[in-house]
Image (spheres, rainbow, N blue to C red):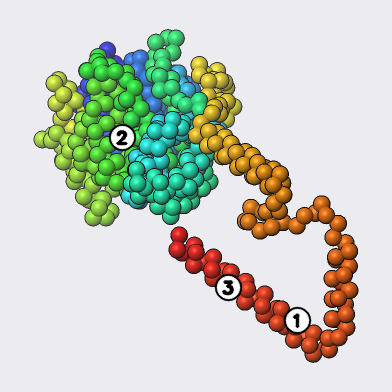
Amino acid sequence: MKGTGSIFIGASTKDETLTLKLANRHGLIAGATGTGKTVSLQILAEGFSNAGVPVFCSDIKGDLSGLAVAGASKDFLEKRAREVGLEKTYSYEAVPAVFWDLLGEQGHPIRTTISEIGPLLLARLLDLNDTQEGVLNVLFELADDEGLLLLDLKDLRAMLVHVAERASELSTVYGNVSKASVGAIQRRLLVLEREGGEHFFGEPALDIRDFIRSAPDGRGVVNILAADKLMTSPRLYAVFLLWLLSELFEELPEVGDPDKPKLVFFFDEAHLLFSEAPKALIEKVEQVVRLIRSKGVGVYFVTQNPLDIPETVLSQLGNRIQHALRAFTPRDQKAVRAAAETFRPNPDLNTERVITELGVGEALVSTLEGKGIPSVVQRTLIRPPSSQLGPVTEAERRTLIQSSAVFGLYERTKDRVSAYEVLQSRAEEEQRQEQRRREKEDTQARKHGEPRRSRSGFQLPDFGRDDRPRKESVERRSRRRSQRDTVLEAGLKSAARSLGTSLGRALVRGLLGSLKRGN
């Protein structure tokens, strides 16, 4: 950082900086693969941390983990430092970092509860249609009305069974509840579990304030989410980021326009937030991005193509770093034009042409200045990072995790009484009451000398009476009849019995089927 109150990005015809007071006006880092987006994210994260601003960033390739380790001297880094005017102040140092992981493998576990994520994002996560989402809304409403906590996936499964059993009753109160929709949701839950989604739901839930920490030396902590494995479940990744943004909006107080942000978010692979998202969800993202600025939170989207971001969101991203784009297809050419048109024009620069000519480590930069007016776009050499380029080793990561200030807070799961336990207890109590009722009926029947009956109403044999003489008489008569039967008669009787049994079974199945259809 060359000056106070700003972050040094690189050099063009002048120093290109990001003003901290305007950093919560959000931003965009865009460019094709391999053009330097990760380094731009890295130097901004370093700058915010050095200014005392906590940072959250998702690490898709593992490279951002290098923020936690000091860089090593390399010729090309030293050369770039001289080119941008940092030869006297450039040094190698790490930033205070905390590693997180939804799967709990490469960082501290991150969890939330089913209740906190809510039906809208859960429907998005499970890719439900409108009818199925309606059933999910009924489930949440019923859980609230009956005081049932929804914490993890077993609570959700128990509530789905509960809703299905009471479908007819609930339809008259909350609206139509389809058992077929319940079944579809249960099948989607199985898919989510196979993708590792069960790790995300439960307790202890993340305290959002653990993302807003400072190191003892006053620098902001950089929270790094290990997302390489998470990217195999892109819908879970997108929903997690949207939930995190919503939680910040709900939890943080209004601060207006502070001298520097309270927290800065970098959302890598931002197109996953909006890919196939329903209109209602995009509107929610737009609303949160627009309003969260007043909470002192800056949101920076990182993506390959500016067209990945809806226009309603793109228009709110005032600070921009645009790396090279390739114009091989009509869509690529449209993206180049769209990117060029979003910058404040520079009469000395053909923005649309330069976007396709930028080298690795170069970018078009425009940031907010003065009263929030974008600066004229400039072709800029991006400064070299002070932290390590590339990922940390597994041993380094493990040491950093165990020395973290939050180590031990989230490693062990908790399982308090919630919907699953309550509904299970209710079912067990109903079974006990039914057992007591049957025993009472049997006792009364024996007192009055009535034959004991099965649950279906058929009379049961009295095993307390000696039936041996009667059985022996029946067996003697049966033997005498069988001795009088000819071989032909025996065969005909056997066939008749077989036919009778088959017809009987068919009639029973037909009768039960018609009763079921009639229900």
Nearer to the camera, 68 or 311: 311
Point out the tag, 1 or 2, that comes first from the N-terminus.
2
Above or below 193: residue 85 = above
Nearer to the camera, 228 or 475: 475
On the image, numbered disc 3 is attached to which residue? 507
Residue sitting at 57 percent across and 39 percent down? Answer: 430
Q: Secondary structure at mark 2?
A: strand
Q: Please state which amino acid type lies under the numbered disc 1.
A: Ser
Q: Quadrant of residue 417 in the image?
A: top right
- In this rendering, would 70 be left or right of 321? right
Evaluate whether residue 262 shows in this view: yes
Point out the tag, 3 or 2, that comes first from the N-terminus.
2
On the image, numbered disc 2 is attached to which residue? 301
Q: Any mark on residue 494, and which?
A: 1
Instruction: Classify mark 1: residues with Cα within 10 Å, few (<14), some (14-19) or many (20+).
Output: few
Residue furthest to the left: 347
Residue 175 on image: x %, y %: 33, 46
Residue 186 on image: x %, y %: 48, 48
Residue sitting at 20 percent across and 41 percent down? Answer: 311
How many marks are shown on the rendered structure? 3
Mark 1 vs mark 2, CA separation in Å: 80 Å
- In this rendering, would 82 be left or right of 453? left
Check whether the beta carbons of the residues at disc 3 and disc 2 lie within 8 A of each other: no
Instruction: Classify mark 2: residues with Cα within 10 Å, few (<14), some (14-19) or many (20+).
Output: many
Check whether the beta carbons of the residues at disc 1 and disc 3 lie within 8 A of each other: no
